[in-house]
Amino acid sequence: MGVFDLFHVGHLQLIRNACEHCEYLRVGVLSDDLVRHFKGHDPVIGEEERRQIIEAVKGVDEAVIIRDEVSRIGEWYKRPYDCFFSGDDHAGNPYWEKEREELRELGADIRFFPYTASQSTTRIIQKILENGEEYRK
C-alpha cells in the first residue's frame, strides 16, 4: 500500500519487483483522508485517479483504496495475502519488524526491495516549485 501520488519510476520499480515475486498482485492506494492524516496535505491526484493509474500498470491485478487504517495486520484480516512488499527504507524499523513477526505467525511475510532514493513525489513537487517560472514558459 502507498500514496502513489505523481506516479514516478520509484513506484514503477516497486511494482515491477513485486510482480516478480507473486502470482496475484493487489496494491493498496491510501485514501485522500489518510494522506492528509499522515502527510499533512492533500495529494495532488485524487484517490480514485491514483487507484486507476495503479490498476493500469502492467502486472497489477487489483488496486484498492485503503480507507480505514494503514496496518499491514489489519489489511491481512480484511484481504488475506501471502506477502507484503515495501521499499527497504522501512527495513529495520521496529514497528515494521513487529508487524513482520505478527504476519509470519499468520503465514505471511514482508519483503523489502531497494528504495529508489533518486526519485520521490516530494522531490518532484520541490522541483516544480523551485522552477515554477521556467515551467510556465
Image (cartoon, grey):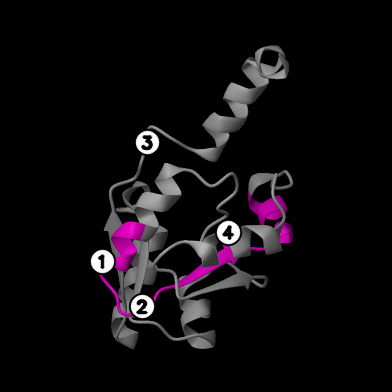
Report the magenta residues as a range. 16-38
Are there few (<14), some (14-19), or many (20+) residues within 10 Å of tag 3? few
Alpha-carbon span between mark 4 and mark 3: 22 Å
Could you tell which of marks 3 and 1 lies nearer the N-terminus? 1
> In front of the other: label 2 or label 1?
1
Could you tell which of marks 4 and 3 lies nearer the N-terminus? 4
Could you tell which of marks 4 and 2 lies nearer the N-terminus? 4
Alpha-carbon span between mark 4 and mark 1: 20 Å
Could you tell which of marks 3 and 2 lies nearer the N-terminus? 2
117 and 24: which is toward the camera: 24
Q: Would you place residue 33 above or below residue 102 in this image?
A: above
Q: Would you place residue 47 above or below residue 129 in this image?
A: below
The spot of residue 26 in percent (x, y) is 46, 74
Residue carrying label 3: 117
Residue carrying label 1: 20
Residue carrying label 2: 102
Residue carrying label 4: 53
> In front of the other: label 3 or label 2?
3
Query: Which amino acid does the dot numbered 2 rest on?
Result: Glu
Query: Which amino acid does the dot numbered 1 rest on?
Result: Glu
Badge 4 marks a residue whose secondary structure is helix
The spot of residue 12 in percent (x, y) is 41, 51
75 and 47: which is toward the camera: 47
Alpha-carbon span between mark 4 and mark 2: 31 Å
